[in-house]
Image: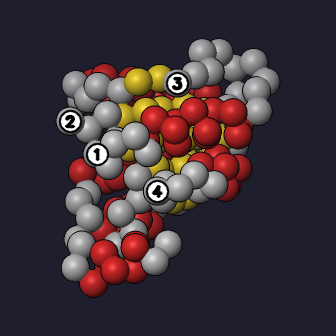
Amino acid sequence: MKKIFISSDHAGFKLKESIKSYLSNKKILYIDMGPYNDNRVDYPDFAHKVAEKVKLNKNNVGILVCGSGMGMNIAANKHKNIRAAQCFNLKSTKLSRLHNDANIITLGSRLLTKKNALSCVGVFLNTIFEGGRHSKRIKKI
């Protein structure tokens, strides 16, 4: 069974809360790994928490939000078997899943509108890895 783990830093907190509402409205279960307010925190702490959970099961996925999406992306990708993708639009999100089997999406709260971010989350959760020629490439990572 797929588990969705979500986290942010202080800059991404408000968007994380919007994503949680979006998921709840769609009856999609998730686990919030913090923070639980918008007090200043260090993004790597939360990226590592989510990455640790996602790598426990190949069906798990993560959603990480910070100001740019870059810091969370860099920190999450330090973990073996994590393929975090910083997504900006529907096409980058879809391709991250189709071709790269991304298991974490990172979003920049200062770079995306709420509507765009929520659309990206929907695409991320509903797109299946194509496999085939892409599988051998994933094994090289």
- Amino acid type for the residue under numbered disc 1: Asn
The residue shown at (29%, 25%) is 29
For this orientation, the residue located farthest to the bottom is: 133
Residue that label 1 marks: 59
* Mark 3 or 4, nearer chain start: 3
- Amino acid type for the residue under numbered disc 4: Asn
The residue shown at (39%, 80%) is 137
Q: Residue 117 in the image: state x and y as whole percent.
A: 47, 46
Q: Nearer the viewer, mark 4 or mark 1?
A: 4
Q: Does the residue at mark 1 contact the one at mark 2 (Cβ under 8 Å)?
A: yes
Q: Report, in whole angstroms, how far the alpha carbon at label 4 lies from the one at label 2.
A: 18 Å
Mark 3: few/some/many CA within 10 Å (<14, 14-19, 20+):
some
- Amino acid type for the residue under numbered disc 2: Met
Q: Report, in whole angstroms, how far the alpha carbon at label 4 lies from the one at label 1.
A: 12 Å
Q: Report, in whole angstroms, how far the alpha carbon at label 1 lies from the one at label 2.
A: 7 Å
Quarter of the image for the N terminus: give it. top left
Does residue 98 appear anywhere in the picture? yes
Residue that label 3 marks: 33
Q: Secondary structure at mark 4?
A: loop
Residue that label 2 marks: 1
